Image: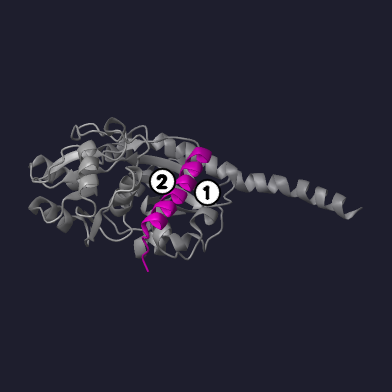
């Protein structure tokens, strides 16, 4: 028998075993890595999702928090395991922004794939009470007249807050803003209310209290999916900036090369979890929009997000060592 014929026969004999192995998945407990501390939004998304997957597949889905280094420590754990669907990761847009601004011990695009893209949420643009602009359109006009003289805060260098602000400046025609990094959003919002800084791009949950108290102004959103119950501030399209879109996302990721049958089963189950229950309720409280889509569509979104923030970081010369 020739070599090519023997190889064909061997492959044919192996396929039933491969099919049985995939059909038996998961044959043991599945790890769900969260590359952030307990108690944050990623953890709050991962735990009800893991409960749903456990009920759906009949094996424990065990959440493991592996925080540190802008999510890169937990993400690095993923590339040490086989692409067999037995180790997954729930993460967010920090996965993309970290890859954009620092050297990571993995190739984010080549070694990860999105199994399910769970939800997206815009940021709200806040202004100090005495700052003249009241809308995004007025902000653009003001920044053009005062280049480099407006300070905006963020949760730190390379954060989604900073990158969203820099993308806004780029899409509005190359405007100039001054970045003031903080250790978290608490001190940044305090300084915004005091007028120490003028702008902040942040999540609705972190800003709701200070908005409701009237201590700051909500002057716009960074995407079109304005959350129900959020302030009626204008969206980018309503402000003459149709090409500007930024925000946060949550997704379920696996090692690239996970068998398609396993990936698609996980995708279907994750999409089911978005239709109701604890996960859907939590996402609503975050001002997030569930985004059920196919695994291929979710992976295309992930790749585009990685590429976009790399471009923004390069153009703004943002690098975290």
Q: Quadrant of the C terminus?
A: bottom left
Which SS type dominates the magenta stretch?
Answer: helix
x and y percentages locating residue 99 in the rendered image = 43, 58
Quarter of the image holding residue 142? Answer: top left
Asked whether 304 falls inside the magenta stretch, the response is: yes
The image shows residue 98 at horizontal and vertical percentages of: 39, 58
Q: In the visual, does 2 lie left or right of 106? A: right
At label 2, counting other C-alpha atoms closer than 10 Å, the crowd grade (few under 14, some 14-19, many 20 or more) is many
| Local SS, label 1 | loop
Q: Residue furthest right?
A: 1
The percent position of residue 260, horizontal first and vertical second, equals: 59, 43
Q: Is residue 209 left or right of residue 48?
A: left
Instruction: Compare residues 309 and 71 and report the one nearer the observer.
Output: 309
Q: Residue at x 35, y 43 (%)?
A: 171
Q: How is the rendered protein coloured?
A: one colour
Q: Secondary structure at mark 2?
A: strand
Residue hosting label 1: 26
The residue shown at (48%, 36%) is: 268
Q: Is residue 44 visible?
A: no
State which region is magenta: 295-321
Label 1: few (<14), some (14–19) or many (≥20) C-alpha neighbours in 10 Å: some
- Of residues 248 and 273, the one nearer the viewer is 248
Looking at the image, which is closer to me, 173 or 42?
A: 173
* Coordinates of residue 184 in the picture (x, y in percent): 22, 58
Q: Which residue is mark 2?
A: 251
Q: Which disc, if any, is residue 179?
A: none
Q: Is residue 261 above or below residue 99?
A: above
Label located before the other in sequence (1 or 2): 1
């Amino acid at each position: 028998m020739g070599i090519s014929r023997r190889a064909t026969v061997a492959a044919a004999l192996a396929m039933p075993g491969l099919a049985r192995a995939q059909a038996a998945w998961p044959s043991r407990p599945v790890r769900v890595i969260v590359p952030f501390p307990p108690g944050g939004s990623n953890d709050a998304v991962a735990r009800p999702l893991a409960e749903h997957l456990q009920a759906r597949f009949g094996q424990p889905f065990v959440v493991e928090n592996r925080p540190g280094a802008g999510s890169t420590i937990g993400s690095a754990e993923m590339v040490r395991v086989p692409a067999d669907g037995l180790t997954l990761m729930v993460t967010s847009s920090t996965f993309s922004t970290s890859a954009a601004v620092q050297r990571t011990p993995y190739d984010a695009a080549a070694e990860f794939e999105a199994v399910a893209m769970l939800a997206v949420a815009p940021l709200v643009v806040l202004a100090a009470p005495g700052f003249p602009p009241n809308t995004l359109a007025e902000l653009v006009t003001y920044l053009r007249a005062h280049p480099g003289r407006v300070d905006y805060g963020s949760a730190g260098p390379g954060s989604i807050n900073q990158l969203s602000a820099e993308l806004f400046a780029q899409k509005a025609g190359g405007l100039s803003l001054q970045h003031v990094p903080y250790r978290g959003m608490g001190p940044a919002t305090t300084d915004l209310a005091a007028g120490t800084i003028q702008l902040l791009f942040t999540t609705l949950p972190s800003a709701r209290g200070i908005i409701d108290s009237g201590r700051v102004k909500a002057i716009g959103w960074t995407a079109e999916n304005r959350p129900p119950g959020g302030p009626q501030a204008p969206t980018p399209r309503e402000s003459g900036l149709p090409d500007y879109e930024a925000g946060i996302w949550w997704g379920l990721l696996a090692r690239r090369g996970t068998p398609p049958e396993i990936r698609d089963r996980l995708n279907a189950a994750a999409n089911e979890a978005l239709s109701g229950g604890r996960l859907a309720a939590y996402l609503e409280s975050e001002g997030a929009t569930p985004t059920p889509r196919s695994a291929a569509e979710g992976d295309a979104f992930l790749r585009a997000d990685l590429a976009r923030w790399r471009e923004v970081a390069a153009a703004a010369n943002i690098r975290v060592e």
